[in-house]
Image: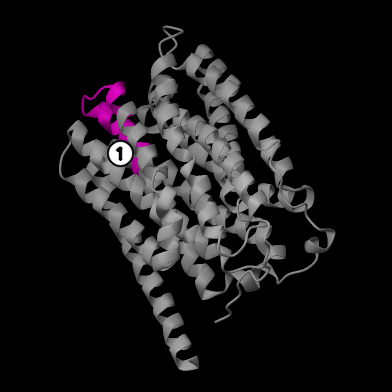
């Protein structure tokens, strides 16, 4: 097994810490934008889509945007620097809000799907915030940098659903129209924040050095890290996407679903204040395994009842499981490439995650409409089991090789 770690050692953690603060703030604002889409997308879809089976297509288009934006984000970052990619992404976020508002006012399902697709492009750029936080940081600080930037999302959990709650009725009878206009303003604020990020500029030599991508992604450690990421995030997305509409189908209110989504997002990002320390103490594989197991626990709760409390508990457990699984898998990816290889490897990793999410997201509406909420939860178990098995095999093999060499 090829074992490549990032070997460059830098003492410029002071700059990295300043960047973490800005990127965490940007993460919070970006998360608020995505929270608006997830809180309203299926409900708006029911209102303006040709049939209920297409209700979750706007959220699926957001996920398609996530997948479509990952590789271009890596290419732009590699050639022009991460800050250029960040500014383009926040610009897409502002356009998302304007088009989303117009789509609701005009009752245009196609325009609304375009808006959420652009929101996905914004989200794809924001996914690279966690990796950008590690640029120029010492090896010891990198897992904490990733974790602390993700912690910015806890404020998204507070801001996003409340933004929807405060603004959804402003332009009656056009539910949520004003919410999207405010979303555009939030994206512009994020643009001002990322403009001040101080990141290492790409070296011209980096465009032509490093191992071929295929050689890097063949590493067992990369395969395990990418697989766990492509399980932790899409599984979370499948359940979260379906939950607001499932709650509505069970007779619960929009306020109930907003409350559940709010605490889901808090649970997604809140643990990030200490996830990095847990990874440093117990190792990333252990934290990833705990995260996948918690996603299975969330599905068990979802199968146990249909009250608001059951939905809320499912979403909270799902959020914590996603945090451990996704942050841990991201830390594992950082161990598989050199500095010169980082943009292409990180972008490819995210492309795999969000590409699979896009495929799964299109089926979530049909799955819920035709088979119900129980079926959505049952789908969680096979991929989680697969991830746990692959993780155990790769790291037991690594320990065995280390013992033989020792």
Looking at the image, which residue is at 58% across and 29% down?
Answer: 114
* 55 or 98, nearer to the observer: 98
Residue 134, image quadrant: bottom right
Residue 198, image x, y percentages: 71, 45
Residue carrying label 1: 368
Q: Is residue 326 magenta?
A: no
Looking at the image, which residue is at 83% across and 63% down?
Answer: 205
Disc 1 residue crowd, few under 14, some 14–19, many 20+, Cα 10 Å: many
Residue 256, image x, y percentages: 27, 26
* 133 or 52, nearer to the observer: 133
Mark yes or no: residue 351 visible.
yes
Residue 353 higher or lower than 224, as above or below: above
Q: Residue furthest top?
A: 172
* 193 or 306, nearer to the observer: 193
Q: How is the image coloured?
A: one colour
Q: Tally the numbered discs.
A: 1
Mark yes or no: residue 371 visible.
no
* Magenta stretch, residue numbers: 239-257
- Horizontal placement of 248 versus 134: left or right? left
Q: Quadrant of the N terminus?
A: bottom right
- Horizontal placement of 240 versus 213: left or right? left
* 217 or 13, nearer to the observer: 13
Residue 284, image x, y percentages: 44, 65
Residue 308 higher or lower than 1, as above or below: above
- Horizontal placement of 255 versus 72: left or right? left
Residue 193 higher or lower than 376, as above or below: above
- Horizontal placement of 335 versus 39: left or right? right
Residue 248, image x, y percentages: 27, 26
Classified by dominant secondary structure, the portion drawn in magenta counts as: helix
């Amino acid at each position: 097994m090829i074992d490549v770690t990032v070997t460059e050692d830098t003492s410029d953690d002071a700059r990295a810490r300043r960047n973490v603060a800005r990127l965490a703030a940007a993460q919070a604002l970006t998360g608020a934008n995505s929270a608006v889409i997830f809180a309203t997308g299926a409900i708006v879809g029911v209102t303006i889509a040709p049939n209920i089976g297409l209700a979750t297509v706007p959220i699926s288009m957001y996920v398609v945007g996530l997948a479509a934006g990952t590789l271009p984000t890596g290419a732009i970052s590699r050639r022009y620097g991460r800050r250029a990619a960040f500014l383009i992404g926040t610009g897409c976020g502002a356009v998302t809000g304007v088009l989303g508002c117009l789509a609701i006012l005009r009752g245009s399902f196609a325009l609304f799907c375009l808006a959420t697709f652009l929101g996905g492009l914004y989200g794809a750029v924001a996914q690279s915030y966690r990796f950008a936080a590690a640029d120029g940081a010492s090896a010891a600080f990198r897992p904490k940098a990733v974790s602390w930037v993700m912690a910015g999302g806890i404020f998204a959990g507070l801001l996003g659903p409340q933004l929807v709650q405060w603004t959804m009725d402003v332009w009656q009878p056009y539910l949520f129209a004003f919410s999207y206009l405010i979303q555009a303003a939030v994206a512009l604020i994020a643009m001002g924040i990322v403009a001040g990020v101080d990141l290492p500029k790409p070296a011209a030599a980096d465009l032509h050095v490093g191992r071929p991508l295929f050689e890097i992604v063949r590493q067992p450690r990369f395969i395990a890290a990418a697989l766990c990421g492509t399980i932790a995030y899409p599984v979370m997305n499948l359940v979260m996407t379906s939950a607001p509409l499932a709650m509505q189908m069970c007779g619960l209110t929009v306020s109930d679903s907003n409350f559940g989504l709010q605490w889901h997002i808090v649970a997604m990002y809140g643990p990030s204040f200490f996830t990095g320390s847990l990874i440093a103490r117990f190792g990333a594989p252990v934290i990833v395994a705990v995260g996948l197991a918690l996603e299975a626990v969330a599905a068990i709760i979802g199968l146990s009842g249909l009250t608001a409390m059951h939905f809320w508990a499912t979403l909270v457990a799902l959020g914590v499981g996603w945090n451990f699984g996704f942050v841990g898998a991201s830390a594992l990816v950082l161990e598989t490439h050199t500095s010169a290889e980082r943009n292409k490897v990180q972008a490819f990793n995210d492309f795999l995650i969000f590409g699979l999410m896009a495929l799964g997201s299109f089926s979530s509406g049909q799955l819920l409409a035709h088979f119900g909420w129980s079926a959505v939860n049952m789908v969680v178990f096979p991929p989680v089991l697969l991830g746990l098995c692959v993780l155990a095999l790769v790291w037991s093999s690594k320990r065995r090789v280390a013992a033989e060499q020792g």
